[in-house]
Amino acid sequence: MAAAIQAEVDGFVAKISDKKDGQAALEGLGALASKGSAAEPFLVAALGAILEATGDKSKNVKDAAVAAAKAIIEMMSPFSVQACMPAFLASLSVKAKPPQKEATLQIIEAVATKSP
């Protein structure tokens, strides 16, 4: 079962940068968060690509990325925060776009609210 979930997550992550399928891929990743702890390690690993999509020019893709990231944060264990830190730091780097930084700060706020 874990291999199937990993393959599904990898397939969605590969489609994030696609202009046509990007929004659907992000919505699919958000939906996978409902599988709970079985999908957690794969979704946390994909968080960097999801946060990168928050800087997309398309508002629909950006909103889908924020929703997917928040869904992952809501389902993940408090012990997974350490695994998310590299993705957060990369999304707050100097090279990141301002909308991406804003979305990342909103996600960090959600983490702090969930696991103070």
Image (cartoon, grey):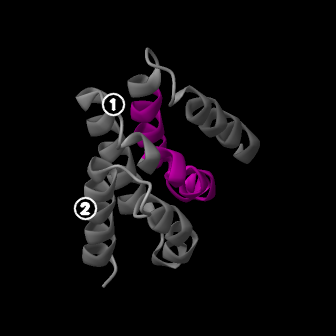
Residue plotted at (65% across, 41% down):
5
Give the residue type at disc 1: Val
Image spot of residue 114 (x, y percent)? 30, 74
Give the residue type at disc 2: Gln
Give the alpha-carbon distance from disc 1 to disc 2, as whole Å: 16 Å
Circle 2 sits on which residue? 106
Residue plotted at (25% across, 57% down):
102
Image spot of residue 80 (x, y percent)? 53, 72
Residue plotted at (47% across, 28% down):
25
Q: In the picture, which quadrant includes the C terminus?
A: bottom left
Q: For residue 32: magenta? A: yes
Q: Callout 2: 10 Å neighbours few (<14), some, many (20+)?
A: some
Tag shown at residue 61: 1
Give the SS element for disc 1: helix
Chief SS of the magenta region = helix
| Of the image marks 1 and 2, the number of the one nearer the N terminus | 1
Q: In the picture, which quadrant includes the N terminus?
A: top right
